[in-house]
Amino acid sequence: MNDSNKTKEQLLQELADTRTQLAAQQEAYKILDTRFKSFFQAAPMDLVLFDHDLRYINVSPSLAAINGKSIEEHLGKTMFEVLPTPEVVAQVEAPYRQVLETDQAIIDAPVSGESPGNPGELSHFLLSIFPVPSLDSEKPDVGSVILNVTEQKRVEEQLRASEEQYRSYFDAALIGLAITSPEKKWIDVNDHLSSIWGYSLDELREREITWIELTHPDDIEVDVAQFNRILAGEISEYNLEKRFICKDRAVIHAFIAVKARRAADGTIQDFVALVQDITERKNAEIEQKRLQNELISAQQSAIQELSTPIIPIMNGIIVLPLIGNLDSVRAKDLMRTMLIGISQHRAKIVILDITGVPIVDTGVAAHLDKSIQAARLKGARTILTGISDNVAETIIDLGIDWSNIETVRDLQTGLKVALTSLGLKLTV
């Protein structure tokens, strides 16, 4: 029906209906606006809504406070008029413009700056920006949720500073430090330990080198046994000396102290190891032991020479005076000394003086007898002198037969016998 054909009553009725619809829409918009504003007022986060010209449509009270203005001072103004500094505006404008141009949301855009609400203190925010359909324009509005991460940043900075301090102490330590997993893999090693082994932490990880591969094969068993005792809960730490094989294949000696660190639930989190290079000390101990053995050997040799000296009396005659207890070891050395003396001095007669020997047992007697027989084989005659009463009684009691050995009372008599046998005579 054309409007010209409508009656006045019909037109008035349509007008009334239209007014009723408009009133209902206005009421609905009013309710929606009230709820929208209530949402902004009550939201436990910072919210803002801009139109396509970046003018404030609404802002949450907490965000308004951060900007140092009331909500009313924001409304209708651009961000350039409200935000505190050009530096903040420069950070904020770009992501909002991008959302308006692309109609694509941006999540967690970072913004930092000094806000009027916290003068002299740097604040940090993450902006999640998204397009919002406009009620009165074809162009979209743009809204965002702003997360204040200042405290989080502060904690992160403190943690980073703490980690840097830990790292500086860790690497500055004049002893090797390492952290390993229960699977024997490297979590961290300090610079000192890297310099000892010749491997950086990255090399150890890339080559999948565990501390087993770095340990000398002969020392693996004892180290693994102690490590497994920690895993079994029998002990919480252990110390030992072991050898490592370095990158250049050099073998070093080290003292290690290993301790398990456990999580709150009691499971082993990792192992902390202290590694001290004691190679120089070990080499010094080895050298000291070698020198000590040489000294002992020299002393023993000197003692042997002093305990059984060879005294050449004249051509063809040598004297071996024995003093002190004559044990089996000295008796054995006697034969060697006697034979050397016979060869060096071309001796035909050996005077073996035992005046200073207090005791002779069966073993010593047997060695003396063998020495005399060995001298005889070298073509030398042996005269035994200085047999004391005690020694004579012992020989008889033991049933030792010295009937084939030439014996005389004392050294003087022995010299006379020796000279006479060479066709010489001792005169006083």
Image: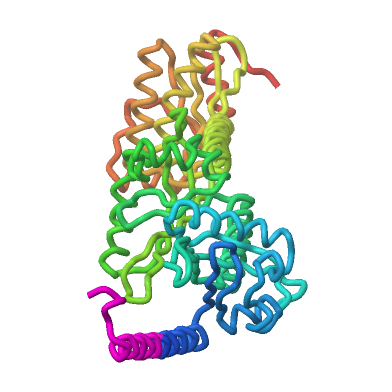
**Does any portion of residue 360 appear in the rendered image?**
yes
**Does any portion of residue 300 appear in the rendered image?**
no
* Residue bounds of the magenta highlight: 1-25
Residue 155 in the figure: left or right of residue 107: right
Vertical position of residue 39 compared to residue 306: above or below: below
* Residue pictured at 25% horizontal, 66% vertical: 232
13 falls in the magenta region: yes
Residue 377 position by quadrant: top left
Residue 239 in the figure: left or right of residue 16: right
Residue 150 position by quadrant: bottom right
Quarter of the image with the N terminus in it: bottom left
Q: Position of residue 358 (x, y in %)?
A: 48, 46
- Hey, which residue is sitting farthest right in the picture? 120
Q: Position of residue 167 (x, y in %)?
A: 59, 55
Q: Position of residue 385 (x, y in %)?
A: 49, 31
User: Nearest the camera: 419 or 13?
Assistant: 13
Vertical position of residue 235 compared to residue 329: above or below: below
141 falls in the magenta region: no
Q: Position of residue 315 (x, y in %)?
A: 59, 9
